[in-house]
Amino acid sequence: MNVENIKAQMRKGVLEYCILSILSNNDAYASDIINTLKEAKMIVVEGTLYPLLTRLKNAKLLSYRWEESTQGPPRKYYELTEEGQSFLNEMDGSWKELVNAVDLIHQTK
């Protein structure tokens, strides 16, 4: 087994949760989301983000708006919808349960 593959799968599994968490703080431009994820070592390939944003938008968890930019074309800013905030709240509870379960199992070794 390859540890790097397992780590990549673990990150991939929580990436949508991380995106929603980032947007719960402030609306963000895609490159801001990418930078935050890169700083946290959660994403390596930028092309990964755009399909996730589209999927979250189609699920009505995100919306976006266009804003004029002083440095080029208008920018698309993503924001959490009310439905997205409710979903994130549920995910917060699920995340805590998962972390507690893994910790409990890990402590028994």
Image (cartoon, rainbow, N blue to C red):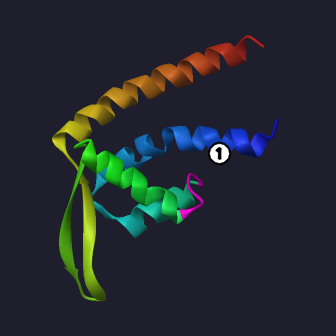
Left or right: 82 with respect to 91? left
Relative height, residue 106 to residue 41 (above, below): above
Relative height, residue 26 to residue 18 (above, below): below
Horizontal and vertical percent position of residue 27: 26, 59
Left or right: 10 with respect to 58? right
The verdict on residue 10 being magenta is no
The verdict on residue 43 being magenta is yes
Relative height, residue 51 to residue 84 (above, below): below
Amino acid type of the residue tagged 1 in the rendering: Ala
In the rendered image, is residue 35 in sight? yes
Magenta region: 41-45
Please identify the quadrant where the C terminus is shown: top right
Q: Main secondary structure of the magenta part?
A: loop
Measuring 47% from the left and 19% from the top, which residue is drawn there?
97
As drawn, the residue found furthest toward the top would be: 108
Please identify the quadrant where the N terminus is shown: top right
Task: Identify the residue position indicated by label 1 in the image.
Answer: 8
Measuring 24% from the left and 33% from the top, which residue is drawn there?
86
Relative height, residue 44 to residue 105 (above, below): below
Between 53 and 70, the residue placed more toward the observer is: 53
Left or right: 95 with respect to 21? right
Between 56 and 91, the residue placed more toward the observer is: 56
In the rendered image, is residue 24 in sight? no
Measuring 47% from the left and 60% from the top, which residue is drawn there?
36
Horizontal and vertical percent position of residue 82: 17, 40
Between 42 and 108, the residue placed more toward the observer is: 42
Residue 104 occupies which quadrant of the picture?
A: top right
Q: Secondary structure at mark 1?
A: helix
Horizontal and vertical percent position of residue 46: 51, 64
Binning the other alpha carbons within 10 Å of mark 1 as few (below 14), some (14 to 19) or many (20 upward) gives few
Left or right: 105 with respect to 11? right
